Amino acid sequence: MKTIQTLLGGLSVAEFLRDYWQKKPLLIRKALPSFEGLLDPQQLIDLACGEDVQARLVTQHGGKFGLQHSPFEPEDFGHFGKKKWTVLVQGVNHHLPEGTELLKLFSFIPHARLDDLMVSYAPAGGGVGPHFDSYDVFLLQGAGHRRWQISTQKDQTLIEGAPLRILKDFSVEQEWVLEAGDMLYLPPHCAHNGIAEDDCMTYSIGFRTPSYQELAEQFLVYLQDRIEVNGMYADPDLKAQKHPSEIGSAMLGQVEQAIKQVRWDKEDIANFLGCYLSEPKPHIFFDSPQRPLSEAKFRQAVQKQGVELDLKSQMLCHAGWIFINGEEFEAGKDDYPLLRELADHRELPAATDISDECAELLYQWYQDGYLTPR
């Protein structure tokens, strides 16, 4: 609790959620007093060159921005001349255990809202220009110093033709220079501009805010494999029409009644959210163990060592249902609290009492690469 209060500048979680979350920015000096970062610039660049990593390289020259997407080669970062530049790497928590541990500090926000940990590096003058995001973000400063300028302006007009979503007119209302361990919380649509004062790295903890349009579209996709509409269109009493190109009222009425058979309830919506919000991003894949343990040896390992989720796994739960990486499983009454603990903490300790049914499920996830003995 003391760590959380330090993280939130002396505020309790309840006070932060009441007064700041999705409402207004908050600057927190020494949120993590001993934090110097998890990577050095070269390690981040090496990560950006990985095949299964999402990364962007932003350059700025003569007031114009350039944008390149991964995959990168090391030589892409070799010569920039007078250009200002920034490299941004998404999903660092999928590749770095320390990244996952950092995210655990923010578990006062539901896991269903978590996006990922993005890490950026820029030499002096680097940045991505003034912009706004549609999600909540905590900007934690690692090595170096970054100047943050923010604005609550309503004008969100963007520069036409720019490769990035850069604001056309940015009116600075407040600004601060953050050093290692300082953190800035920004709610959605708060305009901001980060400029590196020297070689600096910033750790962005982002929380997704999907649009209702996105959720509605994906819910219909989810339903298509879970609905059953009986019967088949038939018109034995068909009458000749004056205009054969016109859709007749009889056809319209019959199809309307068929579509009205489609029903859903809160459980369907909950299960959809569990699957959708735990679905891995398209570039994420899981590797099965090369030399998998037998089920018996796996159970022994879990008893002796415990079990932990793979860094890329996302696990959620609701009312007896478990969702992991886009899949849904109904848990037994006695197994649900244990699996919920795994979802909450991403690990289970050694000597955990596990039922046969739960052990079989954990072993299935182990074979899929979703988790492993610790």
Image: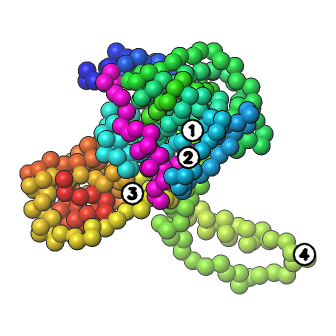
Contact flag, marks 4 and 2 (Cβ < 8 Å):
no
Contact flag, marks 1 and 2 (Cβ < 8 Å):
no
Residue 243: numbered disc: 4
Give the residues in magenta: 32-58
- 190 or 192: nearer the eye? 192
**Mark 2 or 3, which is nearer the eye?**
2
Please give the residue where the numbered disc 2 appears in the rendered image. Answer: 78
Q: Is residue 146 left or right of residue 93?
A: right
Query: Nearer the N terminus, badge 2 or badge 3?
Result: 2
Residue 194 lies, in percent from the top left, at: 57, 27
**Mark 4 or 1, which is nearer the eye?**
1
Residue for point 31% across, 24% down: 34
- Is disc 1 surrounded by few (<14), some (14 to 19) or many (20+) residues within 10 Å? many
- Is disc 4 surrounded by few (<14), some (14 to 19) or many (20+) residues within 10 Å? few
Query: Nearer the N terminus, badge 3 or badge 4?
Result: 4
Residue 69 lies, in percent from the top left, at: 59, 51
Q: Amino acid at mark 4?
A: His
Looking at the image, can residue 167 be seen? yes
Q: Amino acid at mark 3?
A: Asn
Q: Amino acid at mark 1?
A: Thr
Q: Amino acid at mark 2?
A: Gly
- 184 or 113: nearer the eye? 184
CA gap, disc 1 and disc 3: 31 Å
Judged from the image, the secondary structure of the residue bearing numbered disc 1 is strand
Instruction: Check residue 44 for magenta coloring.
Output: yes
Please give the residue where the numbered disc 1 appears in the rendered image. Answer: 86
Residue 164 lies, in percent from the top left, at: 67, 41
Residue 325: numbered disc: 3
Residue for point 47% across, 66% down: 226
Residue for point 51% across, 52% down: 74
Looking at the image, can residue 354 be seen? no
Query: Nearer the N terminus, badge 4 or badge 1?
Result: 1
